[in-house]
Image: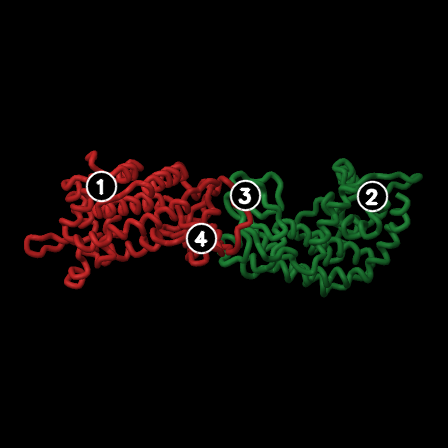
Chain colours: A red, B green
Amino acid sequence: MPPTLPPAIRTLTALGEMRVWSVLITIFGDAIAPRGGVAPAAALQALVARLGIKPEATRVALHRLVKDEWIARQKSGRQSFYGLTDAGEAEFLTARKRIYAPAPALHDPWRLILVETPPAATDLIEIGPQVFLGHRGSDIPDDALSLSGTIDALPDWAMHRLAPNGLQRDYADLEQALIAATVQPIGAPEDAAGLRILIIHQWRRLLHRHADLPPAFFPAHWRGEACRTLVRDLHASLSETADPWLDDIVGAPLLASAS
Amino acid sequence: MPPTLPPAIRTLTALGEMRVWSVLITIFGDAIAPRGGVAPAAALQALVARLGIKPEATRVALHRLVKDEWIARQKSGRQSFYGLTDAGEAEFLTARKRIYAPAPALHDPWRLILVETPPAATDLIEIGPQVFLGHRGSDIPDDALSLSGTIDALPDWAMHRLAPNGLQRDYADLEQALIAATVQPIGAPEDAAGLRILIIHQWRRLLHRHADLPPAFFPAHWRGEACRTLVRDLHASLSETADPWLDDIVGAPLLASAS
């Protein structure tokens, strides 16, 4: 990683998983989707470069996202553009709702569901052998016993099933990195944009590891909600500097209407 | 079995399990407990004789109940008496509540309880691996996840777990026997007392095989509640003839105060 990257970017990058295709998904969700969903290849390269990712790795990752039909490549003269497909757009919409929400979405009444055979695809949360936690909006699988109401008792072992191993520490680490980012000066708009993307990327990565439940469902010292507040505050303050620069390099509103 | 037994008694006896110590428990619950809990050995022998049970089998069963501390033997001159112990009395009180109740006792809100290790002793109803059904009054085991509320969905497999194999057919058979008993004339008061005890015995035996849940928890064509109505009606009509005879042979109010 080039030593010229700002310290806040280095700290957040060091938190873990920075697979390039996944970072590109964050970029599309945070910076491209709100600008019409289409970006010049050059703008994407400029953005990932701010995170210390090599152009060759970016090309490979873009190729994979095209193959998986998240995005599609378009040519206009000698310029390449990448735009979200309809399927990609739909996936982002769901993910964005959770990532940028001011609070966890799920709330009571809860459902406790017992099945004979585990359902193939489900938005239910597995909490025991053949037992799932759901909420009012959850579909009840065929042939399931379902009770809906309020939770009387939630023991430690259940909290630890809802928060996988290591997740608590990862949130604590993210919180420390976010606090550090709050006090480190960010000068250039491209660094503000890069840092904003990294913050969302690391936040998104941890969110994906657990259900969208209120803090009462998680073990003591859960830092998930503290991180949410820091993410939202940092996103807002970095956007003041980052948004004009992104508008400039993505310039999507025009391209989107032409795509 | 002696061919002199009335047809209604023969039909109910033929329904199954007539272990003598268990029949004696029914007799204590139905005829002795309401008369102070103490009966002369001769009265017990007179009662079981009406059901075709031999005196020797009765002596063996009484011995077992004394050994298990359900009842205690007392002597007065050359007469033997058997009386409920305090522990026996307490057991009967709980059982009687259910046997003579006009309707199932359990009602919503229900609890669905998930445990890590199954509780040793519990009034909860096992419904799945590590999963128990309870109601508002149920104790929640330590370390259990518990949700209380209303049941959204109760599939067939759950109903069949609540009603063990064969129980539905056994209730249907009991119903037929009770209907037959309703139309068969009972002349002698000792036969009315014997039939009443048999009806309670066979009803108690089936009740013990399932939880005290409303009919909605059981499979279609559940005859449990139809049997309850017949049992209560027959018990009331047989008591008119049986009670004066029982008062006479048990004569317990006086003995109870002396015990």
In the picture of the structure, the residue carrying the numbered disc 4 is: A134
Name the residue beneath numbered marker 1: A51
Mark 4 chain: A
Residue type at mark 2 is Gly
Q: State the image coordinates of residue B97 (x, y, percent, origin top left).
A: 72, 53
Q: Quadrant of the N terminus of chain A?
A: top left
Mark 4 element type = strand
Q: What x and y, as percent, mark residue A41?
A: 14, 50
Q: Position of residue A6 (x, y in %)?
A: 24, 39
* Residue B176 in view of the camera: no
Mark 1 nearby-residue class (10 Å; few <14, some 14–19, many ≥20): many
Of circles 2 and 3, the one toward us is 3
Q: Distance of mark 1 from mark 3, alpha carbons?
A: 46 Å
Amino acid type, label 4: Gly
Which is more toward the observer, B6 or B26?
A: B26
Instruction: Please state which of the two labelled residues, at mark 4 or mark 1, is closer to the viewer.
Output: 1
Identify the image quadrant of residue B141. top right
SS for dot 2: strand
Q: Secondary structure at mark 3?
A: loop
Q: Can you name the residue that lies furthest to the right here?
A: B77
**Residue B83 has which mark?**
2
Q: Amino acid at mark 1?
A: Leu
Describe the element under mark 1 as helix, strand or loop.
loop
Circles 4 and 1 in contact, beta carbons < 8 Å: no
Q: Is residue B108 above or below residue B62?
A: below
Task: Report the Cα–Cα distance between label 2 and label 1.
Answer: 87 Å
Quadrant of image for the C terminus of chain A: bottom left
